[in-house]
Image (cartoon, coloured by chain):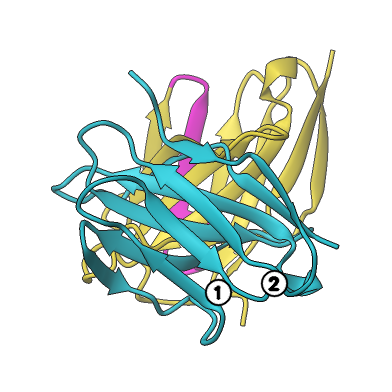
Chain colours: A yellow, B cyan
Amino acid sequence: DQQVKQNSPSLSVQEGRISILNCDYTNSMFDYFLWYKKYPAEGPTFLISISSIKDKNEDGRFTVFLNKSAKHLSLHIVPSQPGDSAVYFCAASNAGGTSYGKLTFGQGTILTVHP
Amino acid sequence: NAGVMQNPRHLVRRRGQEARLRCSPMKGHSHVYWYRQLPEEGLKFMVYLQKENIIDESGMPKERFSAEFPKEGPSILRIQQVVRGDSAAYFCASSPPTGANVLTFGAGSRLTVL
Protein backbone atom coordinates (compact mmCIF):
# COMPACT_ATOMS: atom_id res chain seq x y z
CA ASP A 1 0.00 0.00 0.00
CA GLN A 2 2.01 2.94 -1.34
CA GLN A 3 0.71 6.01 0.46
CA VAL A 4 3.23 8.35 -1.15
CA LYS A 5 3.96 7.93 -4.83
CA GLN A 6 6.48 9.46 -7.17
CA ASN A 7 5.38 8.20 -10.54
CA SER A 8 8.38 9.41 -12.51
CA PRO A 9 11.44 7.25 -11.81
CA SER A 10 13.67 9.71 -13.63
CA LEU A 11 13.80 13.23 -15.06
CA SER A 12 16.37 14.77 -17.37
CA VAL A 13 16.70 18.55 -17.64
CA GLN A 14 19.05 21.02 -19.30
CA GLU A 15 21.10 23.30 -17.07
CA GLY A 16 19.34 26.62 -16.48
CA ARG A 17 15.87 25.20 -17.14
CA ILE A 18 13.20 24.39 -14.59
CA SER A 19 12.99 20.95 -12.97
CA ILE A 20 9.56 19.87 -11.75
CA LEU A 21 9.30 16.80 -9.56
CA ASN A 22 5.89 15.46 -8.66
CA CYS A 23 4.48 13.53 -5.73
CA ASP A 24 1.00 12.18 -4.92
CA TYR A 25 -0.31 10.91 -1.60
CA THR A 26 -3.39 9.04 -0.53
CA ASN A 27 -3.52 9.42 3.25
CA SER A 28 -5.62 12.47 4.17
CA MET A 29 -4.09 12.44 7.67
CA PHE A 30 -0.77 13.65 6.31
CA ASP A 31 -0.29 17.29 7.22
CA TYR A 32 3.41 17.90 6.74
CA PHE A 33 5.43 17.25 3.61
CA LEU A 34 9.14 17.27 2.93
CA TRP A 35 11.58 16.86 0.09
CA TYR A 36 14.93 15.19 0.63
CA LYS A 37 17.84 14.97 -1.78
CA LYS A 38 20.16 11.98 -1.81
CA TYR A 39 23.53 11.52 -3.46
CA PRO A 40 24.98 8.01 -3.96
CA ALA A 41 26.53 6.49 -0.83
CA GLU A 42 25.18 9.32 1.34
CA GLY A 43 22.15 9.74 3.54
CA PRO A 44 19.15 11.85 2.52
CA THR A 45 19.57 15.58 3.09
CA PHE A 46 16.62 17.79 3.94
CA LEU A 47 15.76 20.27 1.21
CA ILE A 48 12.45 22.00 1.88
CA SER A 49 9.14 21.34 3.61
CA ILE A 50 5.57 22.58 3.70
CA SER A 51 2.75 22.41 6.19
CA SER A 52 -0.75 21.60 5.02
CA ILE A 53 -1.94 25.05 6.08
CA LYS A 54 0.11 26.53 3.23
CA ASP A 55 0.04 25.98 -0.49
CA LYS A 56 3.51 27.25 -1.32
CA ASN A 57 6.91 27.51 0.32
CA GLU A 58 9.97 28.99 -1.29
CA ASP A 59 13.65 28.78 -0.41
CA GLY A 60 16.05 30.19 -2.94
CA ARG A 61 15.91 28.13 -6.12
CA PHE A 62 13.53 25.62 -4.56
CA THR A 63 9.76 26.01 -4.31
CA VAL A 64 7.29 23.42 -3.08
CA PHE A 65 3.63 23.61 -4.06
CA LEU A 66 0.87 21.75 -2.26
CA ASN A 67 -2.57 21.03 -3.70
CA LYS A 68 -4.50 19.43 -0.86
CA SER A 69 -7.67 18.79 -2.80
CA ALA A 70 -5.70 16.81 -5.38
CA LYS A 71 -3.40 15.32 -2.75
CA HIS A 72 -0.49 16.40 -4.88
CA LEU A 73 2.73 18.26 -4.29
CA SER A 74 5.53 19.33 -6.54
CA LEU A 75 9.07 20.59 -6.19
CA HIS A 76 10.28 23.24 -8.61
CA ILE A 77 13.99 23.91 -9.04
CA VAL A 78 14.87 26.94 -11.08
CA PRO A 79 17.37 27.43 -12.52
CA SER A 80 18.55 23.81 -12.45
CA GLN A 81 22.28 23.20 -11.99
CA PRO A 82 24.40 20.09 -12.66
CA GLY A 83 25.03 19.82 -8.90
CA ASP A 84 21.30 19.26 -8.43
CA SER A 85 21.66 15.84 -10.06
CA ALA A 86 20.58 13.40 -7.34
CA VAL A 87 17.67 11.25 -6.20
CA TYR A 88 14.80 13.32 -4.81
CA PHE A 89 12.45 11.80 -2.26
CA CYS A 90 9.08 13.15 -1.30
CA ALA A 91 8.03 12.35 2.28
CA ALA A 92 4.94 12.93 4.39
CA SER A 93 4.02 12.78 8.05
CA ASN A 94 1.11 13.26 10.42
CA ALA A 95 2.82 16.01 12.42
CA GLY A 96 -0.29 16.74 14.42
CA GLY A 97 -0.30 13.20 15.75
CA THR A 98 2.15 11.54 18.08
CA SER A 99 4.41 10.06 15.44
CA TYR A 100 6.07 13.15 14.05
CA GLY A 101 9.42 12.07 12.68
CA LYS A 102 7.76 8.97 11.33
CA LEU A 103 7.99 9.76 7.65
CA THR A 104 6.42 7.91 4.74
CA PHE A 105 8.65 8.18 1.68
CA GLY A 106 7.99 7.93 -2.03
CA GLN A 107 10.16 5.74 -4.24
CA GLY A 108 12.30 8.63 -5.41
CA THR A 109 12.95 10.39 -8.72
CA ILE A 110 16.42 10.47 -10.25
CA LEU A 111 17.09 13.98 -11.52
CA THR A 112 19.86 14.48 -14.07
CA VAL A 113 20.79 18.03 -15.03
CA HIS A 114 22.87 18.22 -18.20
CA PRO A 115 25.40 21.02 -18.69
CA ASN B 1 29.87 19.54 14.86
CA ALA B 2 29.48 15.91 13.90
CA GLY B 3 26.26 14.82 12.25
CA VAL B 4 24.57 11.47 12.66
CA MET B 5 27.28 8.83 12.72
CA GLN B 6 26.60 5.28 11.58
CA ASN B 7 28.91 2.31 11.58
CA PRO B 8 29.84 0.11 9.99
CA ARG B 9 29.26 1.69 6.59
CA HIS B 10 29.37 -1.74 4.97
CA LEU B 11 28.71 -5.09 6.56
CA VAL B 12 28.79 -8.51 4.94
CA ARG B 13 27.20 -11.44 6.70
CA ARG B 14 26.42 -15.04 5.77
CA ARG B 15 22.90 -16.37 6.16
CA GLY B 16 22.18 -17.23 9.79
CA GLN B 17 24.69 -14.80 11.28
CA GLU B 18 23.87 -11.72 13.32
CA ALA B 19 24.21 -8.12 12.16
CA ARG B 20 24.63 -5.17 14.51
CA LEU B 21 24.35 -1.65 13.20
CA ARG B 22 25.24 1.34 15.36
CA CYS B 23 24.05 4.92 15.30
CA SER B 24 25.20 7.93 17.29
CA PRO B 25 22.74 10.83 16.95
CA MET B 26 23.71 14.42 16.42
CA LYS B 27 24.91 16.24 19.52
CA GLY B 28 21.89 17.46 21.44
CA HIS B 29 19.51 15.05 19.73
CA SER B 30 17.78 12.45 21.85
CA HIS B 31 15.31 10.98 19.36
CA VAL B 32 16.52 8.27 17.01
CA TYR B 33 14.79 6.70 14.03
CA TRP B 34 15.78 3.73 11.91
CA TYR B 35 14.75 3.42 8.27
CA ARG B 36 15.44 0.70 5.72
CA GLN B 37 15.85 1.14 1.99
CA LEU B 38 15.48 -1.96 -0.15
CA PRO B 39 16.85 -1.85 -3.72
CA GLU B 40 14.80 0.37 -6.05
CA GLU B 41 12.53 1.50 -3.23
CA GLY B 42 12.09 4.47 -0.94
CA LEU B 43 13.02 4.52 2.71
CA LYS B 44 10.65 2.68 5.03
CA PHE B 45 10.23 3.55 8.70
CA MET B 46 11.23 0.82 11.13
CA VAL B 47 11.42 2.17 14.68
CA TYR B 48 11.49 5.36 16.74
CA LEU B 49 13.39 5.43 20.03
CA GLN B 50 14.20 7.84 22.80
CA LYS B 51 16.79 7.14 25.48
CA GLU B 52 15.92 3.75 27.03
CA ASN B 53 12.48 3.74 25.42
CA ILE B 54 10.97 2.35 22.25
CA ILE B 55 8.28 4.83 21.23
CA ASP B 56 7.03 3.34 17.96
CA GLU B 57 8.16 0.03 16.48
CA SER B 58 5.29 -0.39 14.06
CA GLY B 59 7.67 -0.78 11.10
CA MET B 60 9.86 -3.48 12.61
CA PRO B 61 9.53 -7.04 11.31
CA LYS B 62 7.99 -9.19 14.01
CA GLU B 63 10.89 -11.59 14.26
CA ARG B 64 14.69 -11.38 14.29
CA PHE B 65 14.84 -7.57 14.45
CA SER B 66 15.35 -5.53 17.60
CA ALA B 67 16.49 -2.02 18.44
CA GLU B 68 17.71 -0.26 21.54
CA PHE B 69 18.91 3.16 22.55
CA PRO B 70 20.61 2.80 25.96
CA LYS B 71 21.22 5.58 28.44
CA GLU B 72 24.87 5.58 27.44
CA GLY B 73 26.21 4.79 24.01
CA PRO B 74 24.81 4.54 20.52
CA SER B 75 21.53 3.15 19.31
CA ILE B 76 21.84 -0.42 18.04
CA LEU B 77 19.77 -2.15 15.37
CA ARG B 78 20.23 -5.88 15.70
CA ILE B 79 19.23 -8.45 13.11
CA GLN B 80 19.49 -12.07 14.15
CA GLN B 81 19.81 -15.02 11.77
CA VAL B 82 20.04 -12.82 8.72
CA VAL B 83 18.51 -13.88 5.42
CA ARG B 84 19.22 -12.64 1.89
CA GLY B 85 16.09 -10.45 1.99
CA ASP B 86 17.66 -8.41 4.80
CA SER B 87 20.21 -7.02 2.34
CA ALA B 88 19.49 -3.32 2.26
CA ALA B 89 20.73 0.10 3.28
CA TYR B 90 19.82 0.94 6.86
CA PHE B 91 19.60 4.63 7.69
CA CYS B 92 19.52 6.19 11.10
CA ALA B 93 18.10 9.66 11.69
CA SER B 94 17.87 11.88 14.74
CA SER B 95 15.92 14.89 15.97
CA PRO B 96 16.17 17.17 19.03
CA PRO B 97 14.37 16.62 22.37
CA THR B 98 11.52 18.89 21.41
CA GLY B 99 10.85 16.59 18.51
CA ALA B 100 10.92 17.66 14.92
CA ASN B 101 9.40 16.92 11.61
CA VAL B 102 12.74 17.40 9.92
CA LEU B 103 15.08 14.51 10.49
CA THR B 104 18.84 14.54 10.06
CA PHE B 105 20.02 11.32 8.46
CA GLY B 106 23.28 9.48 8.70
CA ALA B 107 25.12 8.12 5.68
CA GLY B 108 23.68 4.66 6.18
CA SER B 109 24.95 1.14 6.74
CA ARG B 110 24.79 -1.18 3.76
CA LEU B 111 24.17 -4.79 4.76
CA THR B 112 24.90 -7.56 2.29
CA VAL B 113 23.84 -11.10 3.15
CA LEU B 114 25.59 -13.83 1.19
Q: Is residue B14 above or below residue B73?
A: below
Q: Return the residue at label 2.
A: B82
Q: Secondary structure at mark 2?
A: loop
Between the C-alphas of marks 2 and 1, the distance is 28 Å
Outermost left residue: B98
Instruction: Please check the rendered image and state whether residue A64 is part of the magenta-colored stretch, yes or no.
Output: yes
Side (left or right) of B42 relative to A100: right
Please name whichever residue, B103 or B57, is drawn nearer the observer in this view of the structure: B57
Side (left or right) of A112 relative to A102: right
**Badge 1 amino acid:** Gln
Q: Return the residue at label 1.
A: A3
| Badge 1: chain ID | A
Q: Secondary structure at mark 1?
A: loop
Pointer 2 local density, CA inside 10 Å: few below 14, some 14–19, many at least 20: many
Specify the quadrant of the image occupied by residue B5: top left
Instruction: Please check the rendered image and state whether residue A79 is part of the magenta-colored stretch, yes or no.
Output: no
Q: Residue at x 61, y 23 (%)?
A: A78
Residue depth check, mark 2 versus mark 1: number of the one nearer the observer: 2
Side (left or right) of B51 relative to A32: left
The magenta segment: A60-73
Q: Residue at x 80, y 71 (%)?
A: B84
Point out which mark residue A64 bears: none
Q: Is residue A34 above or below residue B42?
A: above
Specify the quadrant of the image occupied by residue A110: top right
Q: Is residue A6 above or below residue B80?
A: above
Please name whichever residue, A23 or A102, is drawn nearer the observer in this view of the structure: A102
